[in-house]
Amino acid sequence: MRSESRPVRLAIAGFGLAGQRHANAIRHVENVSLSAIADPDPESRRLAAGHGLTTFEEFEDMLEADIADGVVLSTPTRLHAAQGRACIECRCPVLIEKPLATDVGSARELVETAEHAQVALLVGHHRRFNPLISKAREMIAGGGIGEIRAAHATCWFYKPDRYFDVSPWRKLRGAGPVSVNLVHDIDLIRHLCGEITSVQAASVPSRRGFENEDVAAAILQFSNGAIGTMTVSDGIVAPWSWELTSSEYPIYPPTTESCYLIGGSHGSLSIPDLKIWSHPESRDWWSPISATTVTRDFSDPLTNQIEHFAAVIRGEEIPLVSGRDGLRALQVVDAIRRASRSSAEISLPVD
């Protein structure tokens, strides 16, 4: 914690599940305070007021009150672009929950607006702030598994009907597991393995009759020559997802499985258990292979993300997950959607 640093006031727009998690994280960071909540839902405002927080029905009224040094946007994705631009116009740094926007064009315009105004824009891919990801990246960058040749991410779980009934927008096109869930895994795979240059994909329509998909798979080509595969579903009962393997959020029952496999020329790494598999004597499939578990620290990534956001506001750090990173993850999501519709390989732009 940075007890010697100046206090930072943060406001949250959207006090649903994500907003409440951000509020709890803020409470655990020294010299950072929660100054206000904006939410059109009366029940959400009553809940916030019960915690002694200043509340606003309209997001714009909160901005005009000038009571925050930075804003966390945890509103529905369709509002991100407009609310993000409003923050930038007020020269207020903003942390926007993933995905950055509903479409690539809106996201690009938002990012370019922030860059032109030189106002900090961060994207809430909070898993990068988990110490186990920091350790995994350190091991890969240090040559612990040699040259990356392949990677796989599994994102399988079963969302109950009530998850969709509480928030009907989750049933709509563009709100399926590719956008809502796989976008996190895309960001981490980019963070760990390098830039994605092309995508092939397939998807299956929701069996519950929703507008979105409920199963999808993608083949990824990386700029370093590696190949990646990813599968996602919110209609499969399974233990292989970040939520169930990382023990990051207590509401999910933990398992001892892994959800990412990264294969290298000298070894392979499984995540989140951080096991490195290698041949101790010689690289030979007839030789014994063994696993070493890498030790790492434990801390809450959402708390770490808020601490980092405050440091960015103070000018002490640069964004770990920039607007450009959020845009790139969204471009990959968009490519997966287009590739699954056309059965064609989609090349990603070079920014």
Image: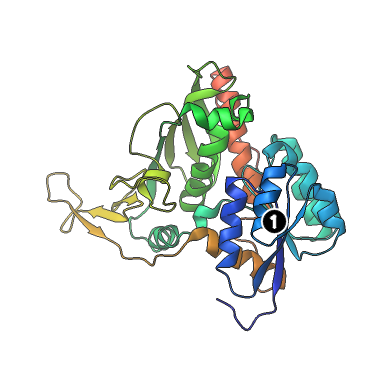
Q: Is residue 213 left or right of residue 276?
A: right
Q: In this view, does 178 lie to the left or right of 46?
A: left
- Picture layout, residue 294 above or below residue 266: below
Residue in the image at 64% along x and 75% along y: 31
Residue 312 locus on image (x, y percent): 67, 67
Report the number of numbered marks: 1
Which quarter of the image is occupied by the N terminus? bottom right
Residue 275 locus on image (x, y percent): 28, 55
User: Label 1: which residue?
Assistant: 49
Q: Quadrant of residue 346?
A: top right
Q: Which of 237 and 120 is in front in this view?
A: 237
> In the rendered image, is residue 178 in sight?
yes
> In the rendered image, is residue 14 in sight?
no
Amino acid type shown at disc 1: Ala
Residue in the image at 65% along x and 55% along y: 322
Residue 232 locus on image (x, y percent): 45, 32
Judging from the image, what secondary structure is the residue with disc 1 in?
Answer: helix
- Picture layout, residue 321 above or below residue 348: below
Q: How crowded is mark 1: few (under 14 residues within 10 Å), some or many (20 or more)?
A: some
Q: Which of 265 and 233 is in front in this view?
A: 233
- Picture layout, residue 289 above or below residue 9: above
Residue 50 locus on image (x, y percent): 65, 57
